[in-house]
Image: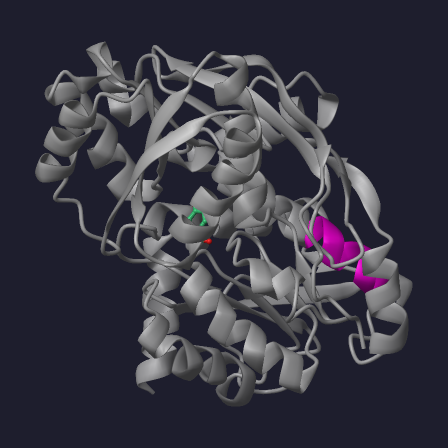
């Protein structure tokens, strides 16, 4: 009962009730719909990320008449709170409690690892609309697990290339201390050190802490050319604001994986001016899919989409390909998964395709935040693939 009440509450909290589609109607009887379980953060520092992903998925399905592959889609949501210790229980709630047909989650790498472990065991079609935990598309890769976002090191790698090109020689890294931060820094070092850059210190703080003062003082005393950072959501906004308030931006250029600015461009205000990042999306990408996506999303939710929304959107595009290949029969996994692996479609980020480990191979763009908007400065890395080390598809 607790579970049902929670799902309903969350539906209201994300504005789902404003859209005309069978969304989050907790149907315990057989409804004929494909039940898509959403394991996403709807509270905490990543709450806005979970909401953007959900909004875009909901919008895509609505535009398809509420159906994919001829089957109605019903979403069932669980707030994972970006809490790894609760991840197994929360995934089990969806898989065994709600008996979902498709699993979709999540944002936080630590939560995603626990979810992926369960998904590997039960073989459910599984979509990852954000978390970049590398093992998921390396040693833990599986025929039923598909990522529509990125590998953590992929983004760091692209940002390192852009920083070298901009003439940065000495950097300090600042990240949350969990797998995504560590892998992001590893990716950054892959290109930055190889190109002759030097990292003088790696500074971390526990997730999701936002006490940055002593870190900022340390960066100031280390005097690097630039900081490479990995933060996202509410924590990213606070980091940019504190960095600016300490006037550190006047001495040390602030760079980061593009999550630093996505979704918080406007809220950052002047604190965001001059922050440079690389990411597989930028709002101003000049393609028809992106323009329509931005217009439709903004009309539906009264705010601009971001990279998280793009990833949610593409998760539903990928699910559509899979369901169409099997006439909506989600149990026909042998036909559904190969169709998804080969899927190519137009994404707001540009062309979408997956590598052999089911992680996107994609362009990364250099962006600079100015006046509340990420400006496109060029391509940071073209059709960059993540390592597939250790991936053996069964
Ligand atoms: C992750 O934990 O993998 C993660 C979280 C938030 C982001 C990017 C990656 O924006």
At horizontal 80% and vertical 56% (from top left) the residue drawn is 356
Q: Is the residue 256 above or below the residue 245 in the image?
A: below
Q: Nearer the viewer, residue 182 or 365?
A: 182
Q: Is residue 18 above or below residue 381?
A: below
Residue 362 is a magenta residue: no
* 185 lies above or below 172: below
Looking at the rendered image, the quarter that the C terminus falls into is: bottom right
> Can residue 37 be seen in the rendering of this structure?
yes
Q: Residue at x 14, y 33 (%)?
A: 218
Residue 25 appears in view: no
Query: In this picture, which residue range is highlighted in magenta?
Result: 316-324
Question: Residue at horizontal 60%, vertical 33%?
Answer: 280
Give the total number of marks visible in the rendering.
0
Q: Is residue 213 left or right of residue 265?
A: left
Left or right, 275 with respect to 114, comes to: left
Residue 186, image x, y percentages: 48, 46
Q: Is residue 318 magenta?
A: yes
Q: Position of residue 104 (x, y in %)?
A: 57, 64
């Amino acid at each position: 009962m607790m579970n049902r009440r929670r799902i309903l509450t969350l539906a209201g909290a994300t504005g789902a009730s404003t859209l005309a589609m069978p969304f989050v109607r907790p149907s315990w009887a057989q409804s004929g719909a494909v039940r898509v379980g959403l394991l996403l953060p709807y509270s905490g520092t990543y709450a806005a990320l979970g909401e953007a992903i959900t909004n875009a998925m909901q919008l895509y399905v609505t535009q398809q008449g509420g159906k994919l592959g001829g089957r109605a889609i019903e979403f069932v949501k669980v707030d994972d709170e970006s809490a790894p210790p609760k991840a197994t229980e929360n995934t089990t709630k969806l898989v065994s409690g709600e008996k979902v047909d498709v699993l979709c989650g999540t944002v936080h790498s630590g939560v995603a690892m626990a979810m992926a472990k369960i998904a590997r065991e039960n073989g459910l079609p599984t979509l990852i609309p954000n978390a970049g935990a590398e093992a998921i598309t390396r040693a833990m890769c599986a025929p039923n697990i598909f990522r529509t976002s990125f590998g953590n090191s992929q983004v760091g790698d692209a940002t390192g290339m852009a920083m070298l090109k901009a003439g940065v020689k000495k950097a300090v890294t600042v990240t949350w201390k969990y797998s995504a931060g560590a892998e992001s820094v590893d990716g950054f070092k892959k290109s930055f050190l190889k190109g002759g850059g030097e990292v003088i210190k790696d500074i971390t703080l526990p997730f999701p802490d936002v006490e940055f003062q002593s870190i900022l003082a340390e960066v100031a005393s280390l005097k690097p050319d630039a900081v490479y950072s990995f933060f996202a959501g509410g924590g990213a906004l606070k980091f940019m604001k504190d960095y600016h308030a300490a006037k550190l931006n006047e001495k040390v250029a602030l760079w980061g994986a593009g999550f630093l600015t996505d979704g918080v461009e406007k809220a950052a205000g002047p604190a965001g001016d001059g922050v440079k990042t690389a990411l597989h999306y930028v709002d101003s990408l000049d393609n028809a899919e992106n323009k329509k996506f931005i217009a439709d999303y903004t009309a539906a939710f009264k705010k601009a989409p971001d990279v998280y929304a793009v990833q949610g959107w593409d998760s539903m595009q990928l699910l559509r390909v899979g369901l169409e290949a099997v006439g909506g029969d989600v149990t026909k996994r042998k036909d559904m998964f190969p169709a998804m692996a080969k899927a190519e479609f137009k994404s707001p980020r540009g062309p979408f395709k997956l590598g052999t480990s089911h992680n996107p191979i994609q362009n990364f763009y250099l962006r600079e935040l100015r006046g509340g908007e990420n400006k496109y400065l060029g391509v940071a890395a073209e059709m960059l693939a993540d390592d597939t080390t250790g991936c053996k598809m069964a």
